[in-house]
Image: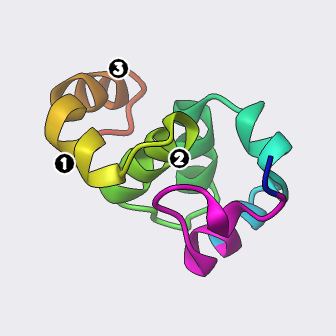
Amino acid sequence: MRKNLRYLEGFGEKSETMLAKVGVHSVEDFQQTDPFELYAKLKAAEINPGLNMIYAIIGAREGIHWQEVARTRKMEILIRLDDMGLAPK
């Protein structure tokens, strides 16, 4: 498994920096955290990740591009975020 988060599908230096701010410093940390809980941590830290970040988180965990996640699973993700009180207004 690769060490740096930036090398996961759909991530880069910016994603790696954002995740470090909420205590995710390795691929192992990332894999052990639920994508929606991680997104909630980013929101709580006032990082304001935007919807593309939840798509990127899910895509990185599953090894697919974030745009594919957005295209095929947007509605289910928005419903889950809404249930968590995190959906965009």
Q: Position of residue 38 (x, y in %)?
A: 62, 41
Question: Residue 66: x percent and y percent?
Answer: 35, 51
**Left or right position of 71 against 22:** left
Query: Which residue type carries mark 3?
Result: Asp
In the image, what residue occupies the spot 53% across and 45% down? 39
Q: Marks 3 and 2, how far apart in space?
A: 23 Å
Q: Which residue is mark 2?
A: 60
Query: Foreground: 22 or 45?
Result: 22
Instruction: Give the alpha-carbon distance from disc 2 to disc 1, as whole Å.
Output: 25 Å
In the foreground, 60 or 76: 60
Q: Considering only order in the chain, which callout, 1 or 2, is on the residue closer to the N terminus?
A: 2
Residue at the bottom extreme of this rendering? 13
Image mark for residue 89: 1
Query: Is residue 29 placed above or below 35 in the rendered structure?
Result: below
**Does the magenta run of residues contain 41?**
no
What residue span does the magenta drawing correspond to?
3-17
**Kind of residue sitting beneath label 2:** Ala
Which of label 2 and label 1 is nearer to you? 2
- Relative horizontal placement of residue 46, taking residue 73 as reference (left or right): right
User: Alpha-carbon neighbours of circle 3 within 10 Å: few (<14), some, or many (≥20)?
Assistant: few
- Determine which quarter of the picture holds residue 71: top left
Is 77 left, or right, of 11 in this rendering?
left
Q: Is residue 55 left or right of residue 35?
A: left
What residue sits 62% from the left and 79% below the top? 13
Please report the residue visible at 53 percent of the width from the left and 53 percent of the height from the top: 43
User: Residue, x 34% and y 22% (percent of image)?
Assistant: 80
Badge 3 element: helix
The secondary element bearing badge 1 is classed as: loop
Q: Gap in Å between the C-alphas at discs 3 and 1? A: 13 Å
- Identified by mark 1, the residue type is Lys
Q: Position of residue 19 (x, y in %)?
A: 68, 61
Asked if the residue under mark 1 is in contact with the one under mark 3, i.e. CB atoms within 8 Å, the reply is: no
